[in-house]
Image (cartoon, rainbow, N blue to C red):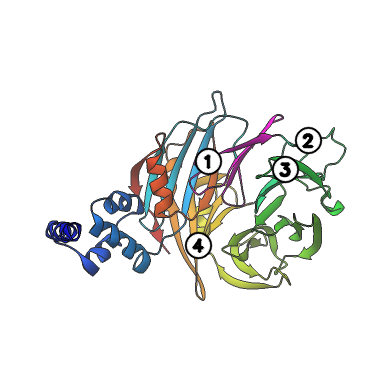
């Protein structure tokens, strides 16, 4: 009985110390950046409940874009900054540089990896707090496609000229930590079996591989180790460059269209069984202008997509990023100034990832001894 009385007294004291409570507090918290909700949840039991309720009832979290930089000179230092589109703020990750293995690369939106002749290192959690390390695949490769499908890492193509099979496929099982050789990529991909020429998307079951310039698409099932296709993924004949990505469980095609005098960017939803395409929306011309270089037209695009948000950028001109939010009946567009590139060092490479980040991910990061966050600035413009 005494313990019950003590709890009642404690709750009354807590209520006195929390003049703002209930729906009002939850509504206020709905405007607070995710980064600040973590300490707010530790204020008291009432605030913890309010944060949880606000996340459940008022806050619609949006995927973060993470911009990684890597110096092209020894000691190849890395940095990371994130953009939170809900709060329109940039966040600096203050942490030790990623241990250098080789050139830092990204794949299908949230996979970071480095591949050397002796080691494969990769990370696919939302904030890349955990890195996995494995022996290198048996075939030496310089520019393969790399994807995580379920518990497997698929490494295909991109082999050196002295290797016997330029289409070789190997699978690394994350649980057993063993490599397995598999059926090679389709022979029709012989001249384009590298990440330079191929765009990939992955869900928990299959890998989708699309030639960027032709739209020819194949699928790979790591469970049965079989390839299917080709499928024509070019809904309009004027598409000259295309990339694919997953929005939750929807396959999305983003294509550059044009005839030399005009340029456009369109999005389609792809039926992953029939490969029929349904147009979702088209980028406004004013935002296409932001992607262009001073002299040349846009010849390629990079895309990071998670949840219902796609970040589209020009790999040669990363100062401006276009954000497309997939909403019922179409797209909502805005531009985002890449503050990481404002003081761009031309001896740095930019690598982009994107993922859904929740309060548990931020809480875990804040508990890490090696990682601290710092707010940078707010930015972005509506269109």
Of residue 342 and residue 95, the one placed in the foreground of this image is 95
Question: What distance separates the C-alpha of mark 1 from that of mark 3?
Answer: 22 Å
**Which sits earlier in the primary sequence, circle 1 or circle 3?**
1
Q: Which residue is mark 3?
A: 144
Q: Are marks 2 and 1 in contact (CB under 8 Å)?
A: no
Viewer-nearest residue: 87 or 25: 25
- The nearer-to-camera label among 1 and 3 is 1
Front residue of this view, candidates 147 and 287: 147
> Is disc 3 in contact with disc 2, using a CB cutoff of under 8 Å?
no
In this rendering, does residue 356 appear at all? yes
Q: What residue range appears in magenta?
A: 106-135
What is the CA distance from the residue labelled 3 to the residue labelled 2?
A: 13 Å
Residue 138: mark: 2
Quarter location, residue 118:
top right
Splitting the image into 4 quarters, where does residue 280 fall? bottom right
Residue 324 tag number: 4
Give me the C-alpha separation between circle 1 and circle 4. Answer: 29 Å
Residue bearing mark 1: 130
Q: Residues within 10 Å of mark 4 (few under 14, many from 20)?
A: many
Question: Looking at the picture, does residue 153 appear above or below residue 261?
Answer: above
Q: Earlier in the sequence, mark 3 or mark 2?
A: 2
* Residue 317: % across, % down: 54, 45
């Amino acid at each position: 009985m005494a313990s019950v009385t003590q709890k009642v007294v404690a709750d009354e004291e807590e209520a006195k110390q929390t003049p703002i409570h209930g729906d009002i507090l939850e509504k206020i918290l709905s405007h607070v950046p995710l980064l600040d909700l973590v300490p707010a949840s530790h204020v008291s039991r009432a605030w913890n409940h309010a944060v949880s309720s606000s996340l459940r009832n008022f806050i619609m979290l949006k995927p973060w874009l993470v911009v990684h930089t890597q110096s092209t000179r020894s000691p190849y230092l890395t940095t990371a900054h994130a953009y939170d589109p809900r709060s329109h703020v940039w966040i600096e990750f203050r942490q030790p540089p990623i241990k250098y293995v080789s050139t830092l690369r990204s794949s299908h939106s949230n996979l970071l990896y480095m591949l050397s002749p002796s080691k494969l290192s990769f990370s696919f959690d939302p904030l890349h707090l955990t890195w996995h390390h494995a022996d290198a695949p048996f075939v030496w490769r310089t520019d393969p496609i790399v994807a995580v499908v379920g518990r497997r890492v698929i490494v295909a193509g991109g082999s050196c000229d002295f290797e016997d099979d330029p289409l070789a496929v190997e699978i690394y099982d994350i649980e057993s930590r063993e490599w397995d050789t598999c059926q090679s990529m389709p022979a029709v991909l012989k001249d384009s079996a590298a990440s330079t020429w191929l765009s990939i998307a992955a869900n928990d079951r299959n890998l989708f591989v699309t030639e960027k310039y032709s739209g020819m698409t194949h699928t790979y099932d790591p469970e049965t180790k079989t390839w299917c296709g080709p499928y024509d993924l070019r809904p309009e004949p004027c598409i000259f460059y295309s990339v694919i990505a997953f929005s939750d469980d929807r396959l999305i095609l983003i294509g550059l269209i044009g005839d030399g005098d005009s340029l456009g960017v369109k999005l389609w939803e792809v039926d992953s069984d029939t490969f029929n395409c349904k147009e979702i929306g088209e980028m406004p011309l004013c935002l296409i202008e932001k992607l262009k270089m001073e002299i040349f037209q846009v010849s390629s695009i990079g895309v990071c997509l998670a949840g219902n948000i796609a970040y589209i950028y020009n790999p040669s001109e990363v100062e401006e990023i276009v954000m497309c939010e997939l909403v019922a009946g179409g797209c909502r567009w805005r531009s985002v100034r890449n503050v990481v590139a404002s003081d761009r060092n031309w001896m740095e490479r930019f690598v982009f990832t994107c993922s859904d980040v929740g309060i548990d991910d931020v809480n875990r990061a804040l508990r890490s001894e090696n990682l601290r966050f710092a707010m940078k600035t707010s930015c972005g413009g509506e269109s």
